Image: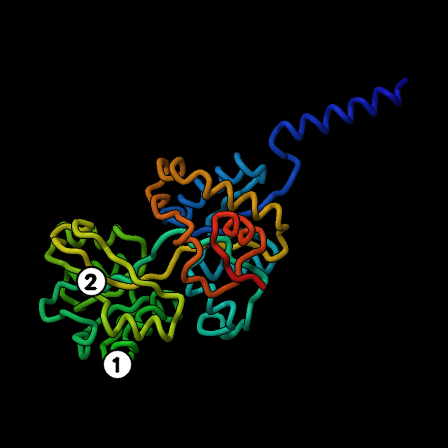
Amino acid sequence: MKKIISILLAVVMLFALSACGGSAGTKMTMGTGGTSGTYYGYGGVLGQYIKNNAGINVTVVSTDGSKANIQGIEAGNYQLGTVQSDVMSYAWEGTRSFEEEGKVDSFRTVAGLYAEAVQLVTMNPEIKSVKDLKGKSVSIGAPGSGVYFNAIDVLTAAGLTESDINAQYQSFADSADALKDGKIDAAFIVAGAPTPAITELSTTNEAYLVPIDGEIAETLMASCPFYTVHTIPAGTYAGQTEDVQTVTVKATLIVSADATEDDVYKLTAAIFDNIDAITAENAKGAELSIENATSGMTVPFHAGAAKYFAEKGTTVAVD
């Protein structure tokens, strides 16, 4: 009788766990970014929808961003991560910021999430195009950072090199302060728009964005396919009366290559079947779409994500 009771209790416990949405099932840790950044806050929203709708227990952690998240997946510490699409391309190819480590292929793409626009901001009325940066003092981000390589890419597409400018290596906030104080002429800032540093600057100063378009954009995208065109709408910043054309990389969700097809299918569905609800909690959700999720990606998709997008009529590359 005791044996029968034990078996019955085990069966009851099994059903109870199943009813709780798979609380005893898959667990994933998601690497994001700093606690004051978009990656962390948005990652928290996505993690909650994955947990509630896919039965996957997601723990969202603050990290140093894209490179750290890729390295965390490689080490087995994370199973999910938010990254810039260009940085994940460097990892996949073993170039630039991953030149020392070499190729990392332990992750796959889930989906592009939102645009991280390459924004060239200035208060110098002489600067109307990227080519006008020649001989000027320009902030291009920390050496080896994503911003640094974005700036170098844009300069190269305009026929300029790092030595053609007086390069400064500053953070977003320091760049804004330096522009206010007249210490630099322009700054590259790569982030979702509106970006707080530029918002603050344009509110109290006559700052404006320099377009990255036309032949420069075409040359850039031909050599670096992880860039796509992007429009920053009029009114995004104080004094911005017209749309500004530029290029963008994408904030992207990646997953461990070892994750199961079923889990990745479910977590992809948990995000893209709940776009309106996610948008109500974080404005970046408005950029979620099948087209945005699947374009401009240079790293193969996980089979689970590919299965979901195929059901929506879009075929993506897997390996």
Real-space Cα separation, disc 2 to disc 1, in angstroms: 19 Å
Q: Which residue has dot 2 on it? A: 121
Q: Are marks 2 and 1 in contact (CB under 8 Å)?
A: no
Mark whose residue sits in front, 2 or 1:
1
Label drawn at residue 62:
none
Q: Which residue has dot 1 on it? A: 159
Foreground residue, 59 or 192? Answer: 192
Q: Quadrant of the C terminus?
A: bottom right
Residue 10, placed above or below residue 287: above
Q: Residue furthest top?
A: 1
Name which residue type carries label 1.
Answer: Gly
What kind of element bears circle 2?
A: strand
Residue 228, placed above or below residue 273: below
Q: Residue at x 35, y 35 (%)?
A: 280
| Sequence-first disc among 2 and 1 | 2
Q: Residue at x 53, y 36 (%)?
A: 53
- Image-based side of 216 in relation to 208, left or right: right
Q: Quadrant of residue 170?
A: bottom left
Is residue 64 visible to us here? no
